Image: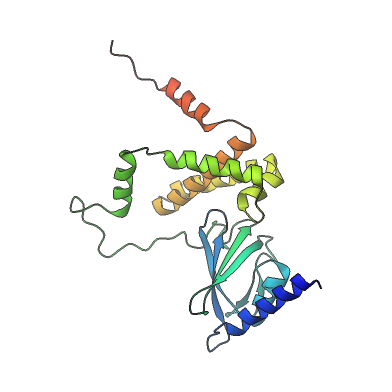
């Protein structure tokens, strides 16, 4: 082991000794997509599963219901490659950022958090703007679709720089077939969400679909501007002169 590796191991051990496990010897772990930052799942780790996660580079948890260690994706193949592990200010909760290989949820959903609890007192219609309405109004005042241009720029940077651990890097490394597979999967999940009449789920799935379409456009070197131009030509308003 090199001196750098020894120092890293010592630093890691110091952190582990400061972790505050609960009375059952467990620690809550929030798993987040390293690229999209979507929260994928919530589980618990014990000392052994955390050590296995650190050593293997993939997520391991402790199943409270089965009373055993659980390698995420060990059976399904939907593993999670760890890019970083953060702990909070109280040292009693983990944030694990990953590059997922497939959906996180056993239902086949990208995230386990695809169901929405209705609010008891939603914002009154006309009585004040909700968060989404305010955001929409703000966008209308400038460029409603500026986020698409920004996302296109970030995806291009990911392709050029290939930062280690980024999900976009993973897609470009795997090639067009993998990207096309993801576009197909997200399109199917969008259809299912629409058929289920679940707008919260539909919002997430359409966002995933648009992201993967932008990755595909970047892989094919087809600028988003050309798509917008094509749409403008198709729906050009008649002149009034």
- Give the x, y percent position of residue 204: 46, 51
Question: Residue 163, how many percent across, how many down?
Answer: 65, 51
Regarding residue 67, the answer to whether it shows in the image is no
Q: Relative to residue 203, is residue 166 drawn left or right?
A: right
Farthest residue to the top: give it.
Answer: 241
* Left or right of 115 in this view: 120: left
What residue is rendered at 55% in x and 44% in y?
154
Q: Is residue 135 above or below residue 33?
A: above
**In-front residue for pair 26/93:** 93
For residue 233, what is the image quadrant?
Answer: top left
Measuring from the top left, give residue 138's x and y in whole percent.
31, 44
Where is residue 134 drawn, in percent x and y? 29, 49
Q: Residue at x 44, y 43 (%)?
A: 147
Closer to us: 109 or 88: 88
Q: Is residue 229 left or right of residue 159?
A: left
| Outermost right residue | 1
Of the 4 image quadrants, the one containing the N terminus is bottom right
User: Is 128 situated left or right of 190 in this image?
Assistant: left
Residue in front for this viewpoint, 77 or 192: 77
């Amino acid at each position: 082991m090199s001196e750098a590796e020894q120092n890293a191991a010592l630093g890691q051990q110091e952190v582990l000794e400061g972790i505050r496990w609960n009375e059952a010897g467990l620690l809550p772990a929030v798993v987040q997509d390293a690229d999209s930052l979507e929260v994928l799942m919530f589980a618990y780790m014990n000392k052994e599963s955390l050590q296995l996660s650190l050593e293997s580079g993939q997520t391991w948890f402790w199943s409270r219901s089965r009373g055993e260690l659980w390698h995420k994706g060990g059976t399904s193949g939907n593993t999670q490659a760890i890019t970083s592990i953060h702990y909070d200010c109280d040292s009693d909760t983990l944030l694990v950022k990953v590059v997922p290989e497939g959906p996180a949820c056993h239902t086949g959903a990208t995230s386990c958090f695809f169901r929405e609890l209705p609010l008891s007192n939603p914002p009154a219609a006309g009585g004040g703007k909700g968060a989404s309405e305010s955001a929409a109004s703000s966008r209308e005042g400038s460029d409603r679709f500026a986020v698409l241009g920004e996302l296109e720029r970030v995806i291009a940077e990911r392709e050029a720089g290939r930062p280690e651990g980024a999900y976009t890097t993973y897609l470009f490394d795997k090639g067009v077939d993998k990207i096309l597979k993801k576009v197909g999967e997200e399109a199917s999940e969008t259809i299912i969400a629409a058929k289920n009449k679940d707008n919260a789920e539909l919002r997430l799935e359409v966002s995933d679909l648009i992201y993967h379409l932008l990755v595909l456009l970047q892989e094919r070197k087809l600028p988003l501007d050309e798509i917008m131009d094509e749409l403008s030509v198709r729906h050009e308003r008649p002149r009034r002169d």
